[in-house]
Image (tube, rainbow, N blue to C red):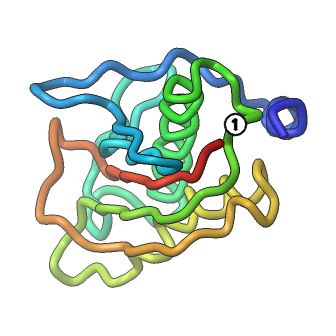
Amino acid sequence: MSGEIEARLAALGVTLSAAPAPAANYVPWVKVGTLVHVSGQISQGPDGLIKGKLGADMDVAAGAAAAQRCAISLLAQVRAACGGDLTRLVRAVKLTGFVNSTAEFTDQPKVINGASDFLVAVLGDAGRHARSAVSAASLPLGVAVEIEGIFEVR
């Protein structure tokens, strides 16, 4: 599957960089049996943190793009957990997405679709997963989105 994953990433114009280092006293991922639990990945791109509050200074499309960046970081962490070998990735199991949003904003699922749609585009049916999409009054460093994930590996 790794060759397929790399080809799909390339077709989307995405290159996985090194897995982001944790910002505090935790590990970026924990492997238990065949599951890799990836710590929350915050929205950041090549130009730095993607900050904003949905419903105030950021629209759904920008939030979905931020969620996609989180999914890219999730895959980078899974690759690290697999010793650099994405052929070991079996499937995405569960995502929990947190959206920095106003009390009135109710489109958190549409924002987290940015990550879900990306994983399906890259992994095919193996990218389909269970999911939660919740609002947060604020997120670390003022980022727009944070997503944690569980993945099955060989």
Residue 33 placement, left or right of 102:
right
Q: In the image, residue 118 lies at what x, y percent?
A: 67, 54
Considering the numbered disc 1 on the image, is that residue within a helix, a strand or a loop? Answer: helix
Q: Amino acid at mark 1?
A: Arg
Q: In the image, residue 51 lies at what x, y percent?
A: 30, 41
Q: Check disc 1 and report the residue beneath it.
A: 88
Q: Quadrant of residue 4?
A: top right
What residue sits 31% from the left and 42% below the top?
A: 39
Front in this rendered view, residue 93 or 142: 93
What residue sits 18% from the left and 42% below the top?
A: 142
For the view shown, which residue lies furthest in the front direction?
A: 33
Quadrant for the N terminus in the image = top right
**Residue 42 against residue 67 in the figure, above or below:** above
**Residue 148 against residue 31 in the figure, above or below:** below
**Residue 138 against residue 66 in the figure, above or below:** below
What residue sits 18% from the left and 65% below the top?
A: 136
Q: In the image, residue 99 lies at what x, y percent?
A: 30, 62
Residue 50 placement, left or right of 16:
left
